[in-house]
Image (cartoon, rainbow, N blue to C red):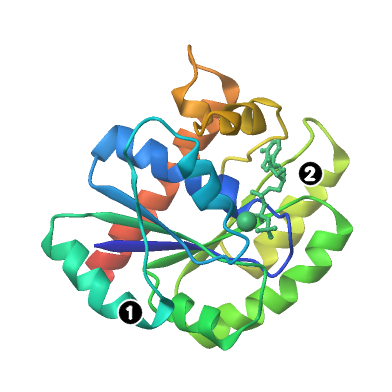
Amino acid sequence: MHIIVAASQKGGSGKTTVVRSLAVAAQQSYGRTVILDLDPQGSLTSWWNRREAPEPALVKFAIAELPERASQLEAAGIEYLFVDTPPSIHPEILDVMRQATMIVVPVRPSPDDLDAVGDTLAMIEEAGRPFAFVLTQAKPRTRLQLSAVQALAQHGKLAPTIIHDRTDFPTAAVTGKTVTEAEGETASAKEVKDVLAYVITQVRKQVREG
Ligand SMILES: Nc1ncnc2c1ncn2[C@@H]1O[C@H](COP(=O)(O)OP(=O)(O)OP(=O)(O)O)[C@@H](O)[C@H]1O
Ligand SMILES: [Mg+2]
């Protein structure tokens, strides 16, 4: 089973939105996907509670139980576990990051957010797991976006697709959905699918390379 953890110490960077969007897209494409909310704010749980569709299922357990529960989920045939975390440097979060197949770090293209990336990178380094940045909430065609791409690329891998700032993300969340569940092929849905394809390629590569 692949454990994909969204982490960033910067509040509001897009962790919860990225987790639910990628998890729903993974469920749509591959099935066998579950989500775990480790943030005491419970945003992912609240979103899931507003949701009609039962999948991806929300699993609930404490961080200390992750190794045992992950084995159980794997034995039950689950292939992808997407984990949402709080904007925190708590040692427990480091523990979760250590168990990740891959860590996804959403970053907004602003100087304040880029400044804060160093703290998250320090944790990732300590966790010693592969990671990739995902640029999110980017305003289309801005200079900020370009400089963020350049800055992040210096620090590590960056998902080649940028997730833009669009109202359909929060609008879909009102009814516990995500952008890939909306009618038609929207630009937001395409971005989410592209980022998922990148993440899946990275985790599968990870497995091959051991
Ligand atoms: N691509 C997007 N377009 C528009 N709005 C977005 C997008 N991504 C996130 N948002 C909005 O930005 C806000 C913060 O996003 P989100 O809750 O996903 O961040 P977070 O990193 O989980 O925050 P926290 O650190 O508090 O857990 C939310 O109101 C969300 O609806
Ligand atoms: Mg959140």
Q: Earlier in the sequence, mark 2 or mark 1?
A: 1
- Foreground label between 2 and 1: 1
- Please state the horizontal and vertical placement of residue 145, each as a whole percent of the image: 79, 44
Left or right of 124 on screen, residue 136? right
View extreme (top): residue: 184
Q: Residue at x 29, y 34 (%)?
A: 29
Q: Determine the image quadrant of residue 24.
A: top left
Residue closest to the eye, 151 or 22 = 22
Q: Which residue is mark 1?
A: 65
The total of numbered circles placed on residues is 2
Amino acid beneath label 2: Gln
Q: Determine the image quadrant of residue 160.
A: top right
Amino acid beneath label 1: Glu
Residue closest to the eye, 184 or 55 = 55
Say above or below: 113 vs 53.
below
Question: Which quadrant: the N terminus?
Answer: bottom left
Q: Residue at x 49, y 31 (%)?
A: 177
Q: Which residue is mark 2?
A: 145
Residue closest to the eye, 54 or 74 = 54
- Please state the horizontal and vertical placement of residue 173, each as a whole percent of the image: 58, 34
Mark pair 2, 1: CA separation: 39 Å
Confirm if mark 2 falls within 8 A of ligand 1: no
Residue closest to the eye, 21 or 40 = 40
Q: Secondary structure at mark 2?
A: helix
Say above or below: 187 vs 150.
above
Question: Which quadrant: the C terminus?
Answer: bottom left
